[in-house]
Image (cartoon, rainbow, N blue to C red):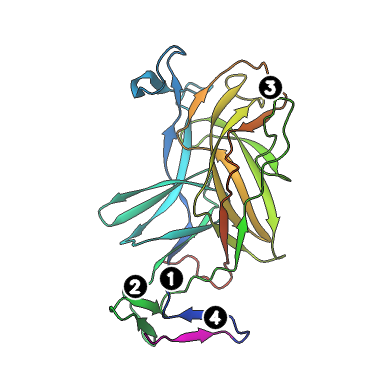
Amino acid sequence: MSTFQAFKDNGQILFDTSLICYGLVKSGYMTYLNSWTRKVLRSAQLDPNEGANWTTTTSQSGTPSADSMFGFSVQNALSPIVFIVGTGCLQGTSISGSTMTFFYANADANTKFYCFDLMADNMAGTTFLKTYDVNGRITFNSLQPPLNVSAAIQAPGPGSVDIYGRYITTYAGGYNVHRQTSTGGEVTKTDSHVDIAIGSGVEYAAFLPWSRSCRINDLFPGNVFAFTQYSGAEGAYGRTGGISFMFGAAGGTTQAYPTVSGQATPCSFENIPTDRYPVALVITTANMPFPFN
């Protein structure tokens, strides 16, 4: 099969018609979508595998404890991937007709997204270049800003452990942030991050193809109960100067309130898989239109 390749002045390949090309379909700031309430077992003696044995937790003000979900929607998605700038952990997607919605925990209205999908012949415009494979499937459309991955960075291993063998941070060289949110229900949570420098003054966006989970032991002051355990989810995000990996509370997580005995630090982390580590893909955002739809 004949192919067509285009290169930049520095010799870097721009596109190759023999390969599948992704193009930008939407970018913008995430918006608040809804809140997923947390659950607690009605009694320690009940079977946790039975959904009816769980009930909604309440905050200090008496409202349901909930995790705010931020995100966005795209139309007619084929195989989309999302790069973000600013905190966020993907919790899943929903599909209604031709609309796909992405849900992120630990994000906010300052989190930016760049959604790419397989290039398609569905954009109006003139003066364009379009290429197709032997089956007539479009492989490149110059009307779409193409995806150009500039780096692939693996998540670091976990941090040091306390006297009970629990991780103090989820990543070596990382740090913890305790915060309280009030959108859709008051809830306290602890995130664990690590910052990885790439290039000073450059804004990057990151996409994590798959992620891990963990258990968070939260003993920070301000919790409704003295000690709270809940599930954490992993994410990766870009920022000016580099990218960061993070673990934060999973959306709509279950909670438990064990005794404080056996806790050596204000926060610790358990059950982090270490037999493999996800690799974040990274792009620069300087040449990407924003917002774009």
Q: Name the residue under label 2.
A: 120
User: In the image, which is nearer the foreground, mark 1 or mark 3?
Assistant: 3
Above or below for 256 versus 189: above
Above or below for 8 versus 147: below
Tell me: 233 left or right of 196: left
Q: Mark 4 points at which residue?
A: 13
Mark 2 → mark 3, Cα distance in angstroms:
54 Å
Q: Where is residue 139 in the image (x, y as percent from the top left)?
A: 38, 77
Mark drawn on residue 263? 3
Circle 2 SS class:
loop
Mark 4 → mark 2, Cα distance in angstroms:
21 Å
Q: Where is residue 52 in the image (x, y as percent from the top left)?
A: 34, 21
Mark 3 Cα shell of 10 Å, populated few (<14), some (14-19), many (≥20): some
Circle 1 SS class:
strand
User: In the image, which is nearer the foreground, mark 4 or mark 2?
Assistant: 4
Q: Mark 1 points at which residue?
A: 23
